[in-house]
């Protein structure tokens, strides 16, 4: 090899190493390549704060270069919102407080009072829908806002660019996941949430979640998911395990068409041994977690 060529090759290698050396911390972003396609998987926090922004240029550049944005569900569609709301209502004559034991009703009333939510606002809701209302309000009290969700931000950016939007799920599928399990499991999940709020743990939990997301700490986030959702519950299987496999299959089907896609999915779906990146790697895709600055 001529000397000048060897020097050029060495210079390129050194430049690549230098870029690696100066790359920042991992992002909650994976690059998935194979079958003639590239898919970027970016973990979303559905309620966030101003601290989530601005997003890394490494994220935005990959979104802008993609042919389409893939989301779990376009929650801005009125029909989807209405479907979730309708499914969350109890049948006429049945009340949430009527499903609870006296101590549970007392705890629910205390939490609602601390959040400034009238008891009547959730009395006609199923436990899972009441849990959603309480979660959103508790997050808001801690400074988190659904309007600052990562997926909301990326959908707005993509719409301005005229980018195609692809939904992985339907409103009916999300209803099946949210309403999964027996009434007893639903009430148990609601009680866990009430305990977190009543004990004052919620702000610290959200802060830990945000920190793990910002630093791309997939292992810590996976631990938080395990702590929050018992592995043996039907809810856990429906909310994460089954949906992860379904999302992975949908992404494979999309990848087989060729092209470049950017998928923004709840971060909990991307971590752990049953996370979507791991499932895609098991199917022969090359999966690499992206670092800030790369």
Image (cartoon, rainbow, N blue to C red):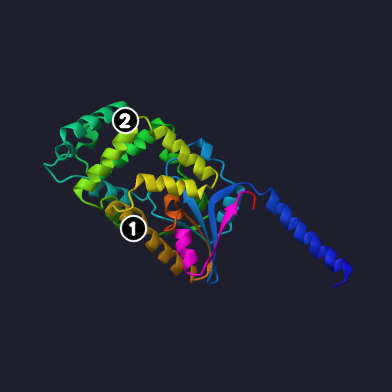
**Can you identify the residue that label 1 sits on?**
170
Seen from the viewer's position, the closer of residues 263 and 230 is 230
Residue toward you, 53 or 114? 114
**Pointer 2 and pointer 1: residues touching (CB < 8 Å)?**
no
* Front residue (pair 69, 9): 9
Residue 143 x %, y %:
44, 32
Q: Earlier in the sequence, mark 2 or mark 1?
A: 1
Residue 118: % across, % down: 25, 29
Residue at 20% across, 46% down: 184
Specify whether 68 is left or right of 95. Answer: right
Q: Is residue 78 magenta?
A: no
Furthest residue to the left?
93
Drawn side of residue 175 relative to residue 245, left or right:
left
Give the extent of the magenta segment: 276-292
The image position of residue 87, as x and y in percent, is: 24, 49
Residue 36, quarter of the rendered image: bottom right
Question: Which secondary structure, mark 1?
Answer: loop
Disc 2 target residue: 198
Residue 278 magenta? yes
Q: Residues within 10 Å of mark 2 (few under 14, many from 20)?
A: some
Dot 2 lies on which element? helix
Q: Nearer the viewer, mark 2 or mark 1?
A: 2
Q: Judge the density around disc 1: few (<14), some (14-19), many (≥20) Cα neighbours within 10 Å.
A: some
Residue at figure coordinates x 77%, y 61% from the top left: 12
Residues at marks 2 and 1, CA–CA distance in whole angstroms:
33 Å
């Amino acid at each position: 090899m001529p000397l000048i060529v060897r020097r050029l090759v060495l210079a390129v290698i050194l430049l690549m190493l230098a870029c690696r050396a100066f790359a920042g911390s991992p992002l909650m972003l994976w690059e998935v390549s194979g079958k003639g396609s590239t898919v970027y998987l970016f973990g979303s926090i559905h309620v966030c704060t101003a601290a989530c922004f601005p997003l890394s240029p490494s994220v935005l550049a990959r979104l802008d270069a993609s042919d389409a944005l893939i989301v779990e569900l376009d929650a801005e569609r009125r029909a989807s919102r209405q479907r979730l709301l309708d499914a969350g209502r109890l049948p006429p004559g049945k009340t949430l407080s009527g499903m609870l034991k006296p101590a549970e009703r007392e705890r629910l009333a205390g939490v609602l009072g601390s959040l400034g939510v009238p008891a009547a606002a959730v009395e006609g809701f199923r436990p899972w829908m009441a849990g959603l209302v309480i979660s959103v309000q508790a997050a808001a009290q801690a400074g988190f806002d659904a309007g600052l969700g990562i997926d909301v931000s990326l959908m707005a950016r993509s719409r301005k660019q005229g980018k195609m939007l692809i939904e992985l799920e339907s409103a009916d599928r999300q209803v099946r996941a949210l309403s999964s399990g027996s009434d007893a499991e639903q009430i148990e999940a609601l009680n866990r949430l009430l305990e977190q709020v009543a004990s004052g743990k919620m702000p610290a939990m959200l802060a830990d979640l945000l920190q793990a997301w910002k630093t791309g700490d997939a292992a810590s986030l996976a631990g938080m998911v395990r702590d929050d959702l018992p592995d043996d519950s039907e809810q856990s299987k429906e909310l994460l395990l089954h949906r992860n496999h379904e999302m992975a299959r949908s992404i494979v089907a999309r990848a087989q068409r060729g092209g470049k896609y950017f998928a923004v999915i709840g971060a909990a779906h991307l971590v752990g041994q049953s996370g979507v990146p791991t499932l895609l790697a098991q199917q022969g895709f090359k999966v690499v977690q992206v670092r800030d600055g790369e």
